[in-house]
Image (cartoon, grey):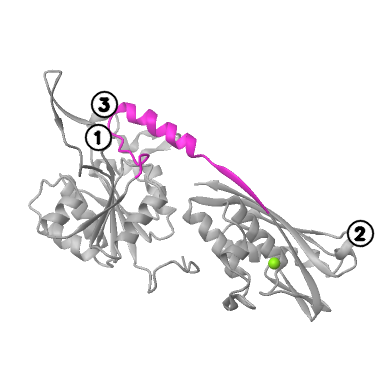
Amino acid sequence: MENDPSAPAGPSPRIAAVIVAAGRGTRVGPGAPKQWRPLAGRRVADWTLDAFRNHPRVERIVLVHHAEDLDELRDMEDILLTPGGATRDASVACGLAALASDPPDIVLIHDVARPLVTPDTIDRVIDALTHAPGAAPALTVTDALWRGDNGRVAGTQDRSGLFRAQTPQGFHFEAIRAAHAAQPGGAADDVEVARSAGLDVTIVAGDERNMKITGPEDFARAEQYLRGRMDIRTGIGYDVHAFEEGEACILCGVAVPHDKKLKGHSDADVGMHALTDAIYGALAEGDIGRHFPPSDMQWKGAESHIFLRHAIDLARTKGYELANCDVVLICERPKIGPHAAAMQSALAEIMGVEADRVSVKATTSEQLGFTGREEGIASQAIATLIRT
Ligand code: MG
């Protein structure tokens, strides 16, 4: 994220995802392959694709499909579609080939049957690739392991050092492409392909929810997770700035001519500050002061869209989208009404949302209190975020 001081320096890598969906999924029983079956109101593949579509660092997505599944590929204009091969290895190689004319730096290879992958897991894989040519999520084995024979325990298996592998498995693009080209076939997954080519693969923390849908009982479990994930959050923000000598007030991104300006460390955009704090509040992420300390001189005179953009980016990184927001400016003058539509468009553009999700309105305080005496402007905002 561009304003996150903890983010690694240098240009961000170009990242593509290859979703492997060419399998027939026969273990779920007769009917459509599992990736095209319904799960919590949509198809399994739709949930999986959205996990990558909604991830801010993933630029392009390739869906490797079965040649017979053309009817399933509607509403996928934003996805690169390519038919797969006879085996999983061959299908991944088809997905990589589809990216080769404009190669990304990093490719994330993911099973379509893992629709519950979270943005955090994807981030952990991407971050580990700064230091390693390959990275993949896995869970430690915590249950005891037995060997069985005819329904009886025949021995115990040491579980130390054992992991349950998940996807996405991430690699430097050219390295994994070369590894696939050299692979004779039959690998269990892309980590095995990478390792057989001598690439180091780092293990990052997996997620228990990132389950692979294999049998019919997995649909019920995945559905339960998805329903539990629906998460609606509301945050509130309040801000005040005093007037000083000047010619215009910056309010919700619009310079409104006035015989005074607002005083503050940044551009003193009181409305945008209240809205930014509302978004941070919905995320339980403190306020502007926490992310942009006033003691830090680099934010002196800063344009407030930097703060708002940071808050909305943080929301998206955490898997939320703005449902709507409502900003109230409280002042006697300047008159807000003639500028409200421009403010609405400015805020919508900064946040990358439709204008009808943004409301800006104003009230006076009937000449009472500090706003009534025209000593400054106050603003209140509320924002609702929904988990995507
Ligand atoms: Mg402020």
Specify the amino acid type for callout 3: Gly
The circle drawn on residue 336 is: none
Q: Position of residue 183 (x, y in %)?
A: 10, 55
* Magenta stretch contains residue 209: yes
For the residues labelled 2 and 1, the Cα–Cα distance comes to 68 Å
- Among all residues in the image, which is located at the extreme top? 151
Mark 1 C-beta to ligand 1 under 8 Å: no
Specify the amino acid type for callout 1: Gly
Which SS class for mark 2?
loop
The circle drawn on residue 25 is: 1
Which SS class for mark 3?
loop
**Residue shown at the point (80%, 78%) measured from the top left:** 244
**Which residue is nearer to you in this view: 4 or 58?**
4
For the residues labelled 3 and 2, the Cα–Cα distance comes to 70 Å
**Residue shown at the point (32%, 46%) measured from the top left:** 206
Comparing labels 3 and 2, the label whose residue is closer to the camera: 2
Comparing labels 2 and 1, the label whose residue is closer to the camera: 2
Asked if 37 appears above or below 83 in the picture, the reply is: above
* Magenta stretch contains residue 17: no
Q: Does residue 241 appear to the left or right of 187 in the view shown?
A: right
Q: Quadrant of residue 175?
A: bottom left
Specify the amino acid type for callout 2: Glu
Callout 3: few (<14), some (14-19), or many (20+) C-alpha neighbours within 10 Å? few
Asked if 373 appears above or below 222 in the picture, the reply is: below
Q: Position of residue 182 (x, y in %)?
A: 9, 58
Query: Which comes sooner in the sequence, label 2 or label 1?
Result: 1
Q: Label 3, on which residue? A: 29
Ligand 1 quarter of the rendering: bottom right
Q: Label 2, on which residue? A: 366
Query: Which comes sooner in the sequence, label 3 or label 2?
Result: 3
Callout 1: few (<14), some (14-19), or many (20+) C-alpha neighbours within 10 Å? some
**Residue shown at the point (69%, 60%) measured from the top left:** 274
